[in-house]
Amino acid sequence: MLRDQITIIIPEHKRPEHLRRLLDYFLSFGLHIIVADSSPVKFKYLAEYDELITYRFFPGEDLAAKLNKVVYLIKTPYVVMCANDDFLVPKAIEEIIEFLELNPDYNSGQGVYTDFKFLNGKIFSSLRYKETTDIDLNSHLAMDRLFALQKKYFQYYYAVFRTETFEQVIKSVICDSESQIKNLCLLESYVSCFSAIDGKHIIMPIFYAARENMETSAATETDTIPEVIQKQKYRAQYRNYLNLLSSHLSNIDNIKYETAFEHVENSIKLYILQLYPNFFTIKGKLIFSIRGLLKRYGILKLIQQFRAKNEDITALPINISNSEELKVIEFYIKKYDFIYK
């Protein structure tokens, strides 16, 4: 039974209606859920779910800190994190667990993502991460897995993990009860890179998750990794990022720390060249300076919101668009259409 195999962790922060929608969706499958809530006030619908979920309230805590405070609650061999504005497909989770059971040298796996928007009473969907719909990080060398990840980057945040791997990556970033990495983009990269170093990972060609294309997502406000590298206020966090990953790579591949540090730095260059190809040029530095000014005065967020509303939405592959799993997700999106009013 899937409930005995997997725990769903939902990091909540100031989106009670989205959380309620997601809880109703997951509970319809009878899954065990842990909510780690860092909102200023407790979940206003908690009384409806108190007997059905495990809820912990950590007002103002950053993501890594609140995850660290709930990992001890996981009693299943596998765990997956789900953003409160997304939907994971239980059938796909089950298939990934079956794969991991048969392949003990893999520590995590995920599948194909879609994007969705709800506009004017209609749901518009498209493929997300189109270049990463079928990947197997299966090298025996951690260094090779790290480079493969950074050359064609994808995030591990919402993958199915073996519980011991998830616990290890979260606890590794905590020192004296304090998160060593708080910037969300840097933390996402850290979780992905640490996991790639730690073991093999697969992206299976199955419908795995629907992610909401939100105008108010944290990504519209969070400094990117190139900005983290440039800004003095992130100096300590970036140093922690490099040191922690280098130590882990040194241990896994049994190489000198200095060699591992060089590999980690080179992998970051690959990541930046892929996603921000102009970063190392004068033009790129100028673009990032302008972007910083636009962000400071709130103009960048308006531009991103305009793009989100007007970007092209392409049709999904027929095996996803006609799937029962997508129909269930769309049912809950429409049921909670008041979120968008």
Image (cartoon, helix red, strand yellow):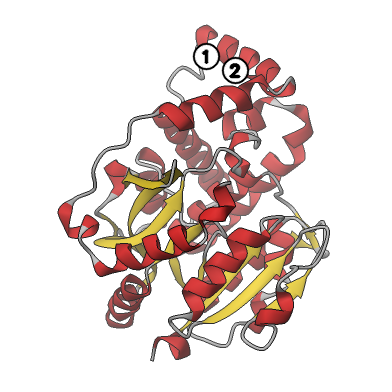
Q: Quadrant of residue 45?
A: bottom right
User: Three-letter amino acid code at disc 2?
Assistant: Phe
In the image, is residue 3 above or below residue 79?
A: below
Q: Which residue is mark 2?
A: 288
User: Three-letter amino acid code at disc 1?
Assistant: Gly
The mark total stands at 2
* Cβ atoms at labels 1 and 2 below 8 Å apart: yes
**Image coords of residue 17 (percent x, y):** 63, 60
**Image coords of residue 67 (percent x, y):** 67, 67
**Image coords of residue 161 (percent x, y):** 46, 71
Write the residue at 51% across / 17% down.
280
Q: Nearer the viewer, residue 247 or 47?
A: 47
Mark yes or no: residue 95 visible: yes
In the image, is residue 14 above or below residue 93?
A: above
Q: Quadrant of residue 71?
A: bottom right
Q: Which residue is mark 1?
A: 284
Write the residue at 38% across / 60% down.
330
Q: Quadrant of the N terminus?
A: bottom left
- Residue at disc 2, secondary structure: helix
**Image coords of residue 4 (percent x, y):** 46, 91
In the image, is residue 328 above or below residue 63?
A: below
